[in-house]
Image (cartoon, rainbow, N blue to C red):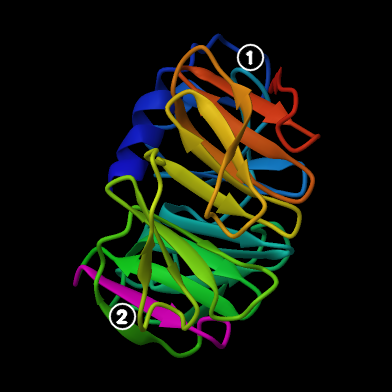
């Protein structure tokens, strides 16, 4: 997935210096995903689940060593997918696993040994996952227990409306698509701009377009510039408490819905 490649290129380039204790960004071989849980910045890496602390320091959140290729956060629920690491109890591929205690323990939910989700998004009881094995987009309405195929995946990002089941937006080659029936059907939303990332929480629908952070209050039909960086936004991650933007080799955070940003140090 294009989004994953961007994550790796950006975060591995963050400068790292020796620390007296803890691990550093430089100790991680690959970083696949960036998500936010409350005010914590989470990293899905080749070595497992980590918390990003500052310009260099990371903390391991999970004793389970596995290659976290897909990662999604919804409140206390952390969903993940990928491949087992040395000594892992997970099968190959991992399928969908769930933690409700910050990654300390994991429950195998479904699709063990069959599916490797890279794109993984969730809200309430709904999940979408793009399976790297089959190329299909899968949808679940029951917390990941059962899945239905939506055909071959063409989306680079998906954002679920937390206020309405079946309602979601997705990006394909910069174009925006919407659905009211969980992508059984979808329609293009005409825009004069191209979007690169999209995030939706209970407060705000946000997106990136080049160096600009955009907000929408009408389900994505129109967008207003909220903030501009000097360089293009590589990654967006959003919770109700924190908005994170990865720009070049820097991680920026905002606690006021993107009106102002500070470096995550």
Q: Which sits earlier in the primary sequence, circle 2 or circle 1?
A: 1
> Which of the two residues, 167 or 261, is positioned nearer the viewer here?
167
User: Is 48 placed above or below 244 here?
Assistant: below
In which quadrant is the C terminus drawn? top right
Q: Magenta residues, as a range? A: 134-144
Residue 260 is left or right of residue 169, and the answer is right
Residue at image coords 33%, 66%: 130
Residue 76 position in % (x across, y down)? 73, 64
Residue 220 position in % (x across, y down)? 54, 54
User: Is 225 placed above or below 62 here?
Assistant: above
Residue at image coords 46%, 22%: 26
CB atoms of marks 2 and 1 within 8 Å = no
What secondary structure is found at the residue carrying circle 1?
loop
Residue at numbered disc 2: 150
Residue at numbered disc 1: 19
Q: Quadrant location of residue 22?
A: top right
Residue 228 position in % (x across, y down)? 58, 20
């Amino acid at each position: 997935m294009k989004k994953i490649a961007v994550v790796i290129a950006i975060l591995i380039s963050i400068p790292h210096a020796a620390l007296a204790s803890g691990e550093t960004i430089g100790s991680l071989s690959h970083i696949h995903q960036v998500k936010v849980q409350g005010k914590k910045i989470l990293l899905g890496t080749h070595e497992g689940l980590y918390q990003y602390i500052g310009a260099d320091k990371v903390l391991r959140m999970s004793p389970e060593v596995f290659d976290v290729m897909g990662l999604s956060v919804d409140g206390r629920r952390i969903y993940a997918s990928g491949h087992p690491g040395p000594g892992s109890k997970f099968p190959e591929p991992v399928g969908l696993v769930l933690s409700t205690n910050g990654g300390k323990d994991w429950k195998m939910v479904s699709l063990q040994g069959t599916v490797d989700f890279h794109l993984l998004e969730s809200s309430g009881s709904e999940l979408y996952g793009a399976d790297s094995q089959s190329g299909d987009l899968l949808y679940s309405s029951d917390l990941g227990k059962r899945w239905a195929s939506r055909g071959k995946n063409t989306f680079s990002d998906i954002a679920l409306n937390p206020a309405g089941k079946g309602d979601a937006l997705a990006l394909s080659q910069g174009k925006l698509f919407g659905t009211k029936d969980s992508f059984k059907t979808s329609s293009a939303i005409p825009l004069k701009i191209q979007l690169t990332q999209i995030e939706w929480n209970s407060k705000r629908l946000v997106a990136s377009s080049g160096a600009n952070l955009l907000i929408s209050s009408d389900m994505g039909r129109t967008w207003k510039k909220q903030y501009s960086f000097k360089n293009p936004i590589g990654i967006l991650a959003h919770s109700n408490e924190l908005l994170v933007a990865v720009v070049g080799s820097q991680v920026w955070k905002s606690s006021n819905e993107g009106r102002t940003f500070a470096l995550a140090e």
